[in-house]
Structures are given as structure tokens and as C-alpha cells.
Image (cartoon, grey):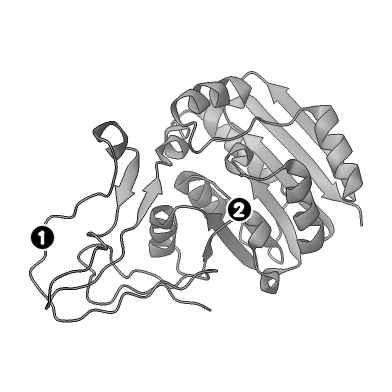
Amino acid sequence: MHSLSFTSSSALLPSLFAFDSSRLFSFQPKKLFPLQSPKLVSLSQSNVSRYRAFSVSSTSPPEGTVSVVDFHEKDWSFLESMEIESTEHTQKIENIINAGEISESSKVLVSFSSEAFVDRLVESSPSQLLLIIHDSLFVLACVKEKYDKVKCWQGELIYVPEKWSPLDVVFLYFLPALPFELDEVFKQLSQRCSSGARVVISHPQGREGLKQQRKEFSDVIVSDLPDDSTLRNVAKKHSFELTQFVDEQGLYLAVLKSSK
């Protein structure tokens, strides 16, 4: 397992966790110096709030300073803003989780979800493996701090290592954030999923909610939710069967089952 380590720079981001990651980040300090205010790189004032800064500048430091790489990430706060506290929303989340039909022996993957969804999944559905995939190191750090046994992998869905296969349940909690064609996504899933595996695509606010989010977060949300016909065609090509499809004003839910 690769580790994401932050040596001697814990004041910037605590070393809370060990990641299963496709990339190994290692910060090697020289001589320590008093920390100064971090600065962002090449971001206009209007864009600064859309990114989290984790470090100081990566330009060559003077003798006796810590050399730290700049790291910024996109704003994924809209995922948490979807998680409103209401009986109706709680029921939607339960419906999404129940669609996965998770058992204690299941290997479960969750792509681009909110922390609240992970919380509910851990509480309600014990499994053999729970793997969280996200672009955000910040989100993964928060998950790993709370749940040490949960696997966290920073990267894209189609590049997930084979070592966690075969997967029994896959939650594509926010498919429109995946920068890949649907055909490419299901091609990869067909290679990683077990026979009878379930893929659950969802949005707890439906198309209308996605439309509003896309206006504000166009750098993160790059596609729409697929319609019934598109899903059936792609699913059939890669040995999946669409078994449930809900496309209502306040909920999108599609369930596909591997038939290989």
C-alpha cells in the first residue's frame, strides 16, 4: 500500500492517514524555518474560494527553508450541500444504499460521494471492503480520520487497481463529475465487477438539482445524467442489465446488474 506522507509539515495538513493511492507524494524537508502565511499560485481573486490550498509556494526557497509542493484542489462543497436534513432526503439516501443490496461479504466501491453518504453507508451496511474513490485529498483525509478500516484511493475510477477486484457493489454517487465517456466507464467496470454485481448511479436531487449545480460548478460537473435508452445500450454492450430506473424531479436512480 502506498503511503501519502507529510513529514515535518503537519501544520499544513495533518498526517492522519495512509492512502491506497496511484501516486506517492513525499515531502522531504531540509532545515526547518518558522512557518509563514501560505500563498496561492496564479489564481484570480474570484477563483480563490473555489480551491483549497494545502501548501506554500513550490518556487526554489532560500537556504534553510522547507521545500513544499503547491497543491490545490477543486471545490467539492456542493456534494455536502446536497445532504440536507429532512425525512424525505434521508429516505432517498436509504433507497440509494438499499439498491446496492450490500451483504457482509460484499466488496463495495463508492465514487465521488459526500462524507455524509459515506457516514450513512458505514453505519447501515457493514461489508468486507469499502473503497472510497475521490479526486479530493481533503475529502479522503476526513473519511480516513473517521474510519481507519475504510480504503481511500485518490484518482479516477477507470484507473482503480485490480487488487480490490472483483467488486460486488459500485456506487456512482455523482457520475456527472467523471471526465470519461459512459462507454469507457462501463468497459472498466465490466473488468472489475463480479458476476451479478450491482452498479448504482444516483443523484438525490435529480436532473433539476444537477442543472443548478452545473451552472456554478462547471469546472467539476462535466456531463449530464444518462437517459434510459443510453444506459440500456451501453449496459448491454458491456454485459450489464438495467434493472431499475427512476428519473423524477427530485431523484435520479439507476441500477444495473452484471450479467457476465
Task: Kindly state the secondary structure of the residue where label 2 is placed.
Answer: strand
Residue 24 visible at all: yes
Q: Position of residue 68 (x, y in %)?
A: 26, 68
- Front-most of 244 and 36? 36
Residue sticking out furthest to the left: 34
Q: Residue 74's image quarter?
A: top left
What residue is drawn where x is 65% and y is 61%?
159
Left/right placement of residue 177 relative to residue 9 reads right
- Front-most of 191 and 23? 23
Residue 99 visible at all: no
Relative to 97, is 247 above or below?
Answer: above
Left/right placement of residue 145 relative to residue 99 reads left
Which label sits on residue 79? none
Q: Position of residue 89 (x, y in %)?
A: 53, 30
Q: Residue 128's image quarter?
A: bottom right
What residue is drawn where x is 51% and y is 28%?
87
Q: Which residue is mark 2?
A: 110
N-terminal of the two: label 1 or label 2?
1
Q: Residue 71's image quarter?
A: bottom left
What residue is drawn where x is 47% and y is 35%?
83
Q: Type of residue at label 1? A: Gln
Q: Which residue is mark 1?
A: 36
User: Closer to us: mark 1 or mark 2?
Assistant: 1
Task: Kindly state the secondary structure of the residue where label 1 is placed.
Answer: loop
